[in-house]
Amino acid sequence: MSGAGYDLALDQAAEALSAAKRVLVLSGAGISAESGVPTFREAQTGLWARYSPADLASPEAFAKDPERVWAWYHWRRSLIARGGPNAGHHALTEMANLKSLQIVTQNVDGLHQAAGSRRVAELHGNIWRERCSACDFHRLVPMAEAEGDGLVRCPDCGALLRPAIVWFGEMLPATALAAADEALAAADCVIVVGTSNQIYPAAALVDRAVAGRAPVVEINPEDTPVSRRVTHRLAAPASRALPALVAHLTT
Ligand code: APR
């Protein structure tokens, strides 16, 4: 989207955001795309166009070939650390200085927190968190230590550590889901950014948002299953639309 259509949609979305007190942001891989972190479902560049989720992001894959799974996650950590947060992440940190803002993300890259966002609920875990496959040991690895490689073992019991990520077939963390429910009930504006809205239960939050009373702003260069049902559609990259929305709030 460009020109008058985008400008009008941006003005209308900014008005809805300006009138809001409590903003909920539902983010997906697209907000990190401009940090050089591949999304999942985009044709050719998406991770699932090149790798099979079943071979890399499931408990069975980890049991079968933990070295391969760790190599993939070490590679993804190095991309995330190299790219760092982009203007879209930083705009949300700035927005949180102007509005009560809760981020609920499907992303595991930790880039919202790296940009300074504090209220971040992670539905799918965090690639920088590791937990023991046998005891309750867990730790957060600083992004600066991204250049890891090989298997990682528990310092307490010696069993394998695994990325503290929700793999296919696993339950989402109850705390993150509870935070999402609470924020959805309280929100008087919802921003859906960078998600194809195809993966449940995360996508159910978007369905509930578009069925609710609060205005919903979708930021995505491509159409998604909810694009026709949102209140305001900004067909633009996150690193362009989010700073523009914040600029409207501060003028
Ligand atoms: N700005 C905003 N959106 C973008 C940008 C950008 N610069 N670039 C791409 N997008 C959009 C794409 O158009 C697409 O709709 O981001 C979306 C990414 O969709 P997916 O790759 O499906 O990622 P996501 O929706 O986050 O996937 C959800 O699926 O595999 C699981 O656990 C994984 O958390 C992931 C979940």
Image: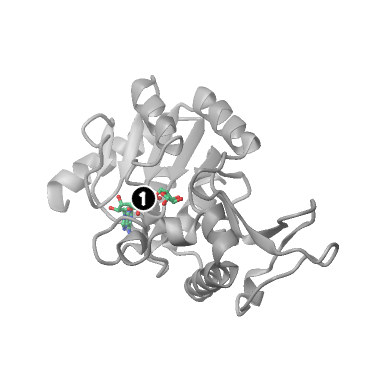
Residue situated furthest left in the rendering: 4
Up-down relation of residue 196 to residue 189 (above or below) = below
Up-down relation of residue 24 to residue 238 (above or below) = above
Does ligand 1 reach within 8 Å of label 1's beta carbon? yes
Name the residue: 79% across, 51% down. Answer: 136
Picture coordinates of residue 196, whole percent (x, y): 32, 46
Tag 1: residue type?
Answer: Gly
Picture coordinates of residue 55, whole percent (x, y): 45, 61
The residue closer to the viewer here, 37 or 221, is 37
Left or right: where 204 falls relative to 157:
left
Residue situated furthest front in the rendering: 64
Left or right: where 46 falls relative to 21:
left
Name the residue: 28% across, 58% down. Answer: 42
* Residue bearing mark 1: 194
Picture coordinates of residue 9, whole percent (x, y): 23, 40
The residue closer to the viewer here, 77 or 14, is 77
Left or right: where 250 falls relative to 144:
left
Binning the other alpha carbons within 10 Å of mark 1 as few (below 14), some (14 to 19) or many (20 upward) gives: many
